[in-house]
Image: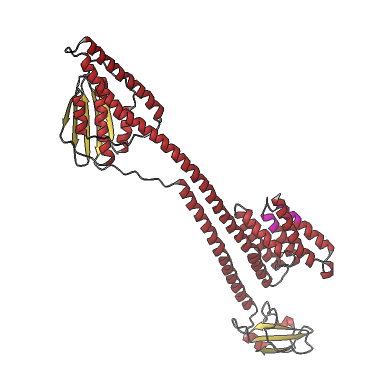
């Protein structure tokens, strides 16, 4: 509804000059009024779907009235449709081809009708000011509106992204909680099960105490199974490794495992410290190795070795074959999370089963872990691209009219020099001319084209002459000029006019 109201108002506005200038009382006719109003209505109707068509129609109507393209009835329509074409058109190629076609058509009409090139220059100037300039303004307004819309869209998108980031942070925190439960509680439950298993087979205890130790071991196994189920609920499929730092050193971790009954050997002592992610990964590798040994090889000896070199540190946890069957179930997520943590620290993790049934867990960690590079937000890149597009549109709106004006000025200067050359009469030829000679006798010495008229402030022409022609006496100066006057096709007078 709003678009129809706008089109109706535009049509009524553009009809006003046609009604005023084509009135029969002003030298026009009602036929011109009806045709003009109908053409304007059709142009307004198709201007949204085919923006260049109204420009072409108005140019054709204007050229039918004058080759200079400037008419009081349709110039306002040219300005309006030029602006709307730039505002509504997505691509510029069709409009540029149309502008070039109008310029070429004007030159052809000027040549065919044998009129002065001054009219063609006026056509180019009218085309530049009444059509091209409004079209460029429309293009700039379109680019600016696009930037504004992009800004609002990006604001909405950033708001949605912030909500999504908050959701991801909550899920990531759940995953970190799951990792901490697996790393710390699983390790502690494994040590409890080791101690309970040792008490269960201790001959110094009575049957009641051994039964209680067995119940404790089974309770630890059940707690570990429930812990595995909780981890499965909280941990995401693609969750990264947890980053919660351990609350103890590697030496303290080995001492606590040794106090729980594991045969742990740690070399060297003290263990070299690593900064950042590498230090956390080192602690986790040792913790995971001891936990796996307590779960799957209770009673076996565990050797932990840390071998530093200038660029990296190699940590190795080797456990022998178990003396009894595994006491606790395995969730299968420990090594996956550990591999992710080592990878984030810039290292590499390997593990394998030895020939005698033991297990080797080995990691190589860099001394200086790489810092994560924050990615540039997509919305910021898109906003920057939209701003660049608007700046380009503004630059085009400035330099294209300037380039057109400079080209038009150079063209006019070149044609002026050519016209001057065509109307230049050699002083020797002028001196040979005699009063009474006919135009046929003078045709070999006369230039192809005389001046369009006498220069300003030229003295009055002699009385009784049929016509007087003016030719340049110098190539560049506008004055003085030669004046040749004719009566009945014969030279009746000649003079150098200052």
Query: Does the segment drawn in magenta span residue 54?
Result: yes
Figure check: 45 above or below 354: below
Figure check: 464 above or below 447: below
Query: Does the segment drawn in magenta span residue 310?
Result: no
Q: Main secondary structure of the magenta part?
A: helix
Whether residue 90 is visible, yes or no, is: yes
- Residue 82 vs residue 96, the one in the foreground: 82
Residue 201, horizontal then vertical, whole percent: 20, 13
Residue 437, horizontal then vertical, whole percent: 73, 86
Figure check: 132 above or below 432: above
Counting labels gives 0
- Residue 404 vs residue 26, the one in the foreground: 26
Which residue is at a point 77% across and 64% down the rendered structure image? 18
- Residue 117 vs residue 394, the one in the foreground: 394
Which residue is at a point 68% across and 52% down the rendered structure image? 48
Residue 119, horizontal then vertical, whole percent: 69, 71
> Quadrant of the image for the C terminus?
bottom right
Residue 47, horizontal then vertical, whole percent: 69, 53
- Quadrant in the rendering for residue 264: top left
- Residue 377 horizontal side relative to residue 260, left or right: right
**Residue bounds of the magenta highlight:** 41-55
- Residue 160 horizontal side relative to residue 283, left or right: right
């Amino acid at each position: 509804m709003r678009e129809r109201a706008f089109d109706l108002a535009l049509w009524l506005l553009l009809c006003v000059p046609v009604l005023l200038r084509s009135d029969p009382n002003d030298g026009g006719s009602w036929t011109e009024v009806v045709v003009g109003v109908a053409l304007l209505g059709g142009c307004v109707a198709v201007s949204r779907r085919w923006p260049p068509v109204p420009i072409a129609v108005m140019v054709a109507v204007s050229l039918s009235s004058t080759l200079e393209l400037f008419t009081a009835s349709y110039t306002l329509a040219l300005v309006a449709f030029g602006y709307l074409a730039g505002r509504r058109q997505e691509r510029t190629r069709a409009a540029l081809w149309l502008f070039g076609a109008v310029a070429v058509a004007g030159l052809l009409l000027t040549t065919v009708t044998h009129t002065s090139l001054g009219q063609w220059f006026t056509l180019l100037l009218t085309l530049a000011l009444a059509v091209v300039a409004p079209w460029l303004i429309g293009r700039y307004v379109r680019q600016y509106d696009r930037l504004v819309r992009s800004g609002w869209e990006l604001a909405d998108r950033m708001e949605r992204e912030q909500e999504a980031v908050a959701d991801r942070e909550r899920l990531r925190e759940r995953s970190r909680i799951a990792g901490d439960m697996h790393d710390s509680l699983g390790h502690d439950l494994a040590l409890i099960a080791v101690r309970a298993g040792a008490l269960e087979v201790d001959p110094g205890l009575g049957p009641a105490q051994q039964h209680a130790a067995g119940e404790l071991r089974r309770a630890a196994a059940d707690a570990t199974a429930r812990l595995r189920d909780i981890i499965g609920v909280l941990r995401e499929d693609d969750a990264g490794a947890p980053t919660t730092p351990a609350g103890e050193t590697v030496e303290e971790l080995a001492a606590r495992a040794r106090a729980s009954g594991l045969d742990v050997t740690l070399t060297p002592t003290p263990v070299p410290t690593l900064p950042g992610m590498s230090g956390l990964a080192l602690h986790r590798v040792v913790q995971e190795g001891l936990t796996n040994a307590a779960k799957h090889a209770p009673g076996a000896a565990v050797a932990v070795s840390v071998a530093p070199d200038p660029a990296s540190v190699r940590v190795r946890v080797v456990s022998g074959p178990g003396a009894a069957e595994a006491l606790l179930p395995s969730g299968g997520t420990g090594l996956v999370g550990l591999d992710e943590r080592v990878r984030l620290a810039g290292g590499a993790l390997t593990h394998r089963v030895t020939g005698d049934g033991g297990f080797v867990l080995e990691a190589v960690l860099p001394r200086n872990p790489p810092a994560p590079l924050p990615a540039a937000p997509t919305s910021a890149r898109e906003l920057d691209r939209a701003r660049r597009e608007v700046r380009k549109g503004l630059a085009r709106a400035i330099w294209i009219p300037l380039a057109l004006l400079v080209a038009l000025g150079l063209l006019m200067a070149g044609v002026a020099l050519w016209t001057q050359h065509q109307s230049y009469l050699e002083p020797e030829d002028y001196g040979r001319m005699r009063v009474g000679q006919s135009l046929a006798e003078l045709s070999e010495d006369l230039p192809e084209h005389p001046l369009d008229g006498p220069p300003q402030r030229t003295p009055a022409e002699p009385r009784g002459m049929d016509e007087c022609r003016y030719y340049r006496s110098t190539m560049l100066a506008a004055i003085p000029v030669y004046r040749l006057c004719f009566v009945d096709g014969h030279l009746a007078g000649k003079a150098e006019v200052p």
